[in-house]
Amino acid sequence: MSPLLEIRNLRTYFRTTAGVYRAADGVDLSLDPGRTLCLVGESGSGKSVTALSVMRLVGVGGSIEPGSKILFGGRNLACASEAEMLKIRGHEIAMIFQEPSTSLDPVYTVGYQIAEAVRAQAKPGQKVTRKAALQRAAELMRLVGIAEPQQRACDYPHQMSGGMLQRVMIAIALAGNPRLLIADEPTTALDATIQAQILELLKELQVKFGMAILMITHNFGVVAEMADDVAVMYAGRVVERGSAASVFTAPQHPYTQALLRSVPVLGMTIEDLHAIPGSVPSPLGWPAGCRFAPRCQHAFERCRLEQPPLTAAGTQESACWLTIRSLDKAREVQH
Amino acid sequence: MTAQQDSTKSASASRPLLAARGLTVSFPVKTGILRRTVASLTAVDGVDLDIIEGETLGLIGESGSGKSTLGRALLRLVEPTGGQVILDGTDVCALAPHALKPVRRQAQLIFQDAAGSLNPLMTVRQIIGAGLRAHGARDQAERDARVAEVLKAVGLDADAGRRYPHEFSGGQRQRIGIARALVLRPRLIIADEPVSALDVSIQAQVLKLLVELKQEFRLTYLFIGHDLAVVDCISDRVAVMYLGKIVEVGSAAEVRDRPQHPYTRALLSAHRPPALGQRGQRVVLAGEPPNPMAPPSGCRFRTRCPLAQDICAEQEPLLEPRGTGHMAACHFSHLVGGPAEPLRVSL
C-alpha cells in the first residue's frame, strides 16, 4: 500500500529579528490511507508546524525551505501553487484545532458556519442552495452526535460548551469528505469525560468516512487510545517512528524511553516517576549533533558531533547513535 | 508540642490542620445595564473537608466543578457565603480583614499560570521578597538571604534573583512561583493545578520537587488538579468534586482501586485507556455537566449517571462512610464496581 501522505526532510523556518527559528528541521514521516498516525512531542518540538506545513498555513515570516517534500496523492504540496492548495484544503485535507472557540466566528450561528463549509466544498459546477446547505449542516451535526441539530444549528458559538464546539469543528471538517483529517490537540482543552467522547466520535467517523487521521498530541493516553502508528518528535525532528504497539512496548530512542517513564500512569508512585533533566532546547539554536544528547544519560562523543539518521531498529525506526552502534556491533559479530 | 500530641500526629487519624465545615461560595449573576442580580451560581456548596497535618490531599474535578474556588475560599481569597474554615484552631471566616495576615502567612498558594502570576516588571528577588516585606521583614540583607535560600531549595541559581520572569522557561517560572510560596515558611500550601501548563518532561521534575520540599519544610499540601494520574501519584488522600460538591473522598489507593461513586468510576475509565489492541472498550460518560446555575434536584450527577433511579432525583445522597476513611455520596455505591470490571448498567 502506498502512503497517502509522505513527508521527507521537511524544514519549515521562521525568520525573526532574533534569528532563524528552525521549527521543523528535517521531519520524516508517512501515513497510510485510513490509518491514524499520532505525532507526539512536547511544546516547541515542531509538531504543530509540521501539520500547518502540510496545509501550507505556516503564515507570514514562515517558509518551507527548498528540498522539503510533502507528498500527498502524487503531488508535492511543498511547492504547490495557492490555487492548487485551495482545491486541497477542506476537500482532501481538513484540519481541526485545539481551541474550537477561537476557530469559529462569534457573530454567525454554528449552522450557518457549517453550511458555509458545505457550499465552499461543493464539487465544481455543482450549485448548492442555501437551503440545501443548511439541511446538510443539520445532517452533519447529527452525525457528530449533536442532539436536536435543527435547533442547535441556530446557536451562536458562545451558547455551546467546549465539547459541543469541537463537534461543530469536526462537522465543518467533514463537509468536504476529506481523505485526511489533521487534528491538532483536539481534546487538550476538554475535560476528561468529554475528551473520551470526542475520541470515540473520531474513531467512529474514521471508519464511516474512511479517512486517515494525523493526530497531534502530547498526551500518551490519547496515543494509546487512537494510534495505529506513532512518530515521536524532539527539537524539530522525528526521533522514533513505528507502530503504536512497538513504540509503546519497546521504545528504542532514549528520549521516547525517558518520556514514557516521566508520564504518570494511574497507580504509579512519585518514586516510579523519572524526570528528564534540563529543558527543551531553543529552535533558534539547536544543539550540535543529536539534539537530545545534552539531556541524554547514554550520550557519548559521537552524539555531540553528528546528527543520527532514522535507522531501522526492531520493528520501528529510531534516530540514535547508540542503536546504530549496537547494530554495527551485531553485524561485526555475524561476519 | 507535647508527647501525646506527637503520638496522635504519627497515628493514622491525625488532627486536621485545616477543616472546612459546610463551606459555601455563591456568586451573584448580574445582567442588563443596571447589573441586576438575576440568579446566583453556587460554585462550592456545603463542602466538608479536612486537611490533615503532613498529608497531601488531592482535589480532583472537571472545569467548573468548583475546585479552584474551594481552594481560594479556604484562604478567603474569595469570600465564602457560608460555613466555616478552621485553620489550626482559628475560624478564618470570623476574622476581620486585617487579622487575616497571620493566617495567610501560614497558608500560601501556587498557581497554574506561573507566567501570569509573576509581575513582569519586578526581578525574581523582588517578587519573592515582596511577601517577606509585607509580613514585616524590614532588613534588605535579611530578605535577600532568605530569598537566596529558597531559590536554592527550588533548584535555581542564586543569580536568578537578579533576572526577570520572562528570562525563564515555563518550568523555571513555576519554580519561582513555588519559591514565592515557600519564603514565608507556610505550613499549608494550596497548589492549584501547578503542573497542568507544563510539558510532560518538566511536569515530573516539578512534581518531584514538590515532594522533596514537602519533606524538607514539613509542609501540608492541598493539590488541585484535573489529571487523575498526576493527582493520584502525589496524594495520600484524594477528594473528588462534581458541581460544587465533594462526591467521594478516601485514600488514593482506595479511590483508585475501589471507587464508590459512579462519577469517580467514569473518571478512572477516562484516564485508564484500554490496553493497546483493545480499542473502544472503555466506559464513555454520556452528556455534559449540567448548568451550575440550575443544578439537578437530588443527586447532581444523576443526569449523567448510568445507575440513576427515581430516588436519586428525590433525595440528595449524603457523604457517608464506605470502608475505612473512605466516604462517598451515592445511593448505589454497592453497584459501582471496580475499575477493571464493566459497569453493570450499560451506558
Image (tube, coloured by chain):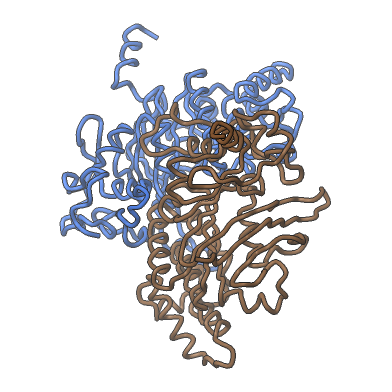
Chain colours: A brown, B blue
In which quadrant will I find the N terminus of chain B? top left
Seen from the viewer's position, the closer of residues B320 and B251 is: B251
Q: Is residue A55 left or right of residue A151?
A: right
Q: Residue at coordinates 43% horizontally, 67% vertically from top-left? A: A206
Q: Residue at x 56, y 44 (%)?
A: B197
Residue at 35% x, 73% y is: A147
Snapshot quadrant of residue A11? bottom right
Q: Is residue B99 something that shows in the picture?
A: no
Along the line of sight, the residue nearer the viewer: A310 or B190 = A310
Left or right: residue A241 versus residue B260 is right
The residue closer to the viewer here, B181 or A282, is A282
Q: Can the viewer see residue B117 in this picture?
A: yes
Q: Quadrant of residue A330?
A: top right
Check the picture and name the quadrant holding the C terminus of chain B. bottom left
In this view, the residue farthest toward the right is: A17
Q: List the single residue furthest toward the top.
A: B3
- What x and y, as percent, mark residue B296? 29, 59
Judge whether B238 appears above or below A146 on screen. Answer: above
Up/down of A121 relative to B134, above or below: below
B230 with respect to A94 (left or right): left
Q: Position of residue B320 (x, y in %)?
A: 21, 39
Question: Can you tell which quarter of the image residue A119 is in?
Answer: bottom right
**In the orientation shown, which residue stands out farthest toward the front?**
A335
Q: Position of residue B93 (x, y in %)?
A: 43, 35
Return the x and y of residue B87 as percentages of the image width and height.
42, 27
